Image: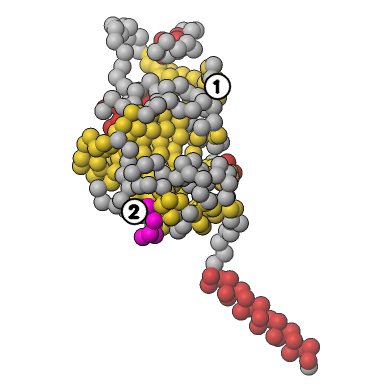
Amino acid sequence: MESSRNRVALIVLGAVLLLVALVTGTRPVHAATQLCGATQTTVVNGGEYIAQNNVWGATTPQCISVSGTSFTVDSAGHANATNGAPASYPSLFKGCHWGQCTSGSGLPAQVGAMPAVTSDWNTTQPGSGAYDVAYDLWYDTRPSTITDPDGAEVMIWLNSRGGVQPAGSRVATGVPLGGATWDVWYTRMSWNYIAYVRTSGTTAVSGLDLRAFTRDAVTRGYIQNSWYFIDAEAGFEIWQGGAGPATNAFSVTVGGGGDGGGGGGGGGTPPPSSGRSCTAALHVDNAWSGGFVATVTVTATGSPAPSGSAHSCVRGGHHA
């Protein structure tokens, strides 16, 4: 009898535990990684992104906890003047950040043939401290993944606290991009610095078109179509305080829709029509300071093309 009661109790307990599991659901749990070193990083999502503590403008302490594509600033003791450079930029990135690269990013991508680049980002923004909530996009004059970028830096400020503002001066107001309006700031450093400041702050964006900001900077003469987009980052530039800002979810998608965009076509007289057409696309597979390796895909339609005709599909001084 006692044994039967025990079996019944175990069955009831098992049913209760199963019910709790069904009600609460089962969600994957990521063990948090804490970064406290000024330049400490960690790979997330199998190398798709890299998280960085990135304390570069001060010697004050800062720690962040990273779990998948989310992170929280656990503690920070920054006290930089708000009219100068920030103390840090804890962030996630895809691409190559000053020589450190993620895997399978599709970058570098030449600006004149830049694919669609969109991003989702959801944040928590405490009311204390002095910081911004900003994307940081980098452009190089070469398709290099190991050298410091020398072309341009585009920041996209979704919000800010504590009276901080971008470097340089305001050059345009109320520019419509990505479903909002933005003020544009510019200054020349060792590269062109451009900041788009949202006129009404937000804590989250979905499907934000990063290519649209690149194209706007091209029309203003700050970026050239021959340059290369190498990196997309999102995080918090922190001047003072710092504990509490958090990225709840973040993603960047390179490619997957939209036109290639970019610069105009070449001049000269077109060859006579042969009933055939072809296109060529170049993707940089690897790059270094002295050159790069790329895959060229040539697509031909119409009647069969003679041997060697792929050369007519490749322009701009490249050879197939």
Q: CA distance from mark 1 to mark 2?
A: 39 Å
Give the amino acid at mark 1.
Trp
On screen, 14 above or below 138? below
Which amino acid, by three-letter code, is at mark 2? Arg
Disc 2 element: strand
* Residue, far bottom: 1
Q: Which residues are magenta?
A: 126-130
Return the mark for residue 288: 1
Residue at image coords 46%, 34%? 231
Position of residue 182 in the picture relative to residue 319 (left or right): left
For the residue pair 100 and 107, the one nearer the viewer reads as 100
Q: Is residue 93 magenta?
A: no
Which residue has dot 2 on it? 161
- Between 107 and 319, the residue placed more toward the observer is 107
Can residue 231 be seen at all in this image of the molecule? yes
**Circle 1 crowding by C-alpha within 10 Å: few under 14, some 14–19, many from 20:** few
